[in-house]
Every structure is written in C-alpha cells, then in structure tokens.
Image: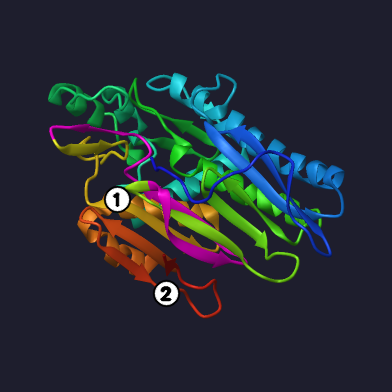
Amino acid sequence: MAGRYSSVLSAAGSLIATGAMNVYRIGFEAMGGVGEVVLSADTMKRAQAMAASAIEEVKRIELKYSRYHSSGIVHRINESAGDGWTECDDETVSLFGYADSLYESSDGLFDITSGVLRKAWDFRNPGLPERELLDALIEMIGWEKAERRGNLIRLPQRGMEIDFGGFAKEYAADRGAALLHAKGIRHGYVNLAGDIRVIGPKPDGAPWLIGIRDPRDHGRMMASIPLSTGALATSGDYERYFELEGRRYCHILHPGTGMPVTHWQSVSVLAPLAVHAGSCTTIAMLKEADALQFLERSCTGFLAVDRLGVVYQKSCDPEYPKSPTLS
C-alpha cells in the first residue's frame, strides 16, 4: 500500500562508527526490498550474530504473511476464498484484530481485502484500467465480509483476498527490534526500506539522525529527524507510479474508487511503534484532504507534503523524539 524511503543504506557488515563500542551496519534483502540492522557491539562477529536473529525473524514473517508464498497462511486463506474455512494461529488472529482497528479508525479506508485492486494496475506500463474491471474488483473488497469464528476465517466470495502488505513490514521491524532488545542490545535500529524502529540511541547517548527524502528529488534530503527511541515511517506517491497526460498515478489505491490517491506527495510519521507509524501514513494518504485532522488526532508527530509541495508538520510531545528539522 505504501512507498517507504527514509535513509540511505550501506553495505552489509560495515563499520560506521567507533568509540567505547563500535557500531555496525548489516544489510540484507527481505520483503521485496533492502533492509539493515544497525547496532553496537564489541566485535563484528557478535554484531553479525545478533543481527542474524533479527533478520531471521523478519524473513519468518515474510514467509508466513506474504501472499506469494504458498506455504504461508495468507496464501492458504486466499486459496480457500468462496470455499472452506482456514484455521489460524494466535499471531495471525492478533493481526486480524489490528486490521479491525485500522478498518474502524480509517472509516473503512484501510482494508486488508483491497489488495485485489493491484490486478487492474500495472505501474510499469502507463495506462488506465477499464472501469468495468475496477467495479468488479471493488465488489470483492470489504473486510467486514470476512467470516470469523475463533481461530477460523473464511472469505465468502471466490476471488476475495487478504493482504497484510499494509503493515507486515512495519510489524517485522518492530518484532526484529524487540528481539534484539531482549538479547541485550540497547543501541541501534532496524530499518526495512525506510520503516525504522529504534532500539535505543547511539552508544554515546546521541540520537540517530534519519533523513527524509524529498518526494520530487530523490537526491535531496528535505528533512532530518534525530531519533533515540520509537519509530518512523513514510508513505508517498513516488515509489511505484507512472505519469500519463501530465497526471501522476501512484500505487496507493482508494478502496472505494479503485483509483490512485492524489492529494499528498508524502507523509512521514513518528510513533512509538513502526506498525503504528506506517499505518498512520497509509491512512493519511487514503484520507487525502481529510488527512490532517486524522494525523492531529492519531499520531505523535508528522511531516506531510501536499501535491503542491506545501509542507505541514506537527511537533512531537516533549517526552518523545524531536520534531523534524527542515533542510
């Protein structure tokens, strides 16, 4: 659902700072993009061992919740649409609960059954889908249609799908960071293609400085944010899109119309958890002109750029990371 870019990644296993404790950056590929674990450790060997546990957790979540993996629960649920029930474990049921809260708080805009709209759009080849196709796909959308009994779920219409892509990456970042913290890591962060969950500040107590790219000039950082805790996520219209007759069509699709959203170039959010930050950015993109009211009500701090390039921002709570600093 959302395009994520926040920081520039470097090579796996690189040493990026020195001091009482070295800081290492371990890069990897997962969830269709690049990621990194940054942490302090006394040796590269220990850093790699610690990072490996977080990377393994990220890849476990990818395998389990990607719609593309036939062994995963999402694939099994989708394959059974219009047919039988699928039994889910407690982790999956808890994510359904989170999907419920997102659906309700977004007035139905954040709908994990709306991924079927991707069948109408090919952002590698400029062109608009037929209205009839969009209307047929919209008929398959509706998280409220899903039937659930305890740990069982059934999608009543053949062709319906669920897709955790709107928050699986952020959930994985949170899980990876939590696992590292449980293993004693106190300085570092997990970054999954710009969805960042901070474990703790640099070894000297200074915050990590995270850059937010200009949505219309990827070579420029439009803002920098010092983070010692919490999470940052960004959604925008610049990751997958095409331009046709002077108009930009991005991959963030409104579940009611089937059409790309147009109001915001990008929305960045600071929140305690990556899954919260990422969900807020996606809902804001989908709410379009009504996003600012939602952001004021729901999020700790944000920086949003509308289609005209006007920047809106809200400072964070004094007990939370500092507000974005525009470049």
Residue at 66% across, 34% down? 60
Neighbours of disc 1 within 10 Å: few (<14), some (14-19), many (20+): many
Query: Quarter of the image containing the N terminus?
Result: top left
**Magenta-colored segment: predominant secondary structure:** strand
Residue at the far bottom in the pictured view: 318
Residue at 86% across, 54% down? 42
Query: Quarter of the image containing the C terminus?
Result: bottom left
Q: Is residue 160 above or below residue 8?
A: above
Q: Which residues are magenta?
A: 218-245
Residue 269, how many percent across, how many down? 43, 60
Structure colour scheme: rainbow
Along the horizontal axis of the image, is 125 left or right of 172?
Answer: left
Name the residue beneath numbered marker 2.
315
Is residue 236 covered in magenta? yes
Residue 94, how many percent across, how many down? 55, 46
Which of the two labelled residues, at mark 2 and mark 1, occupies the earlier sequence position?
A: 1
Residue 301, how many percent across, how many down? 43, 68
Specify whether residue 254 is in view.
Answer: yes
Between the residue at mark 2 and the residue at mark 1, the CA separation in whole angstroms equals 20 Å
Is residue 240 covered in magenta? yes
Q: Amino acid under label 2?
A: Ser
Cβ atoms under marks 2 and 1 closer than 8 Å: no
Q: Which mark is residue 265?
A: 1
Q: Amino acid under label 1?
A: Gln
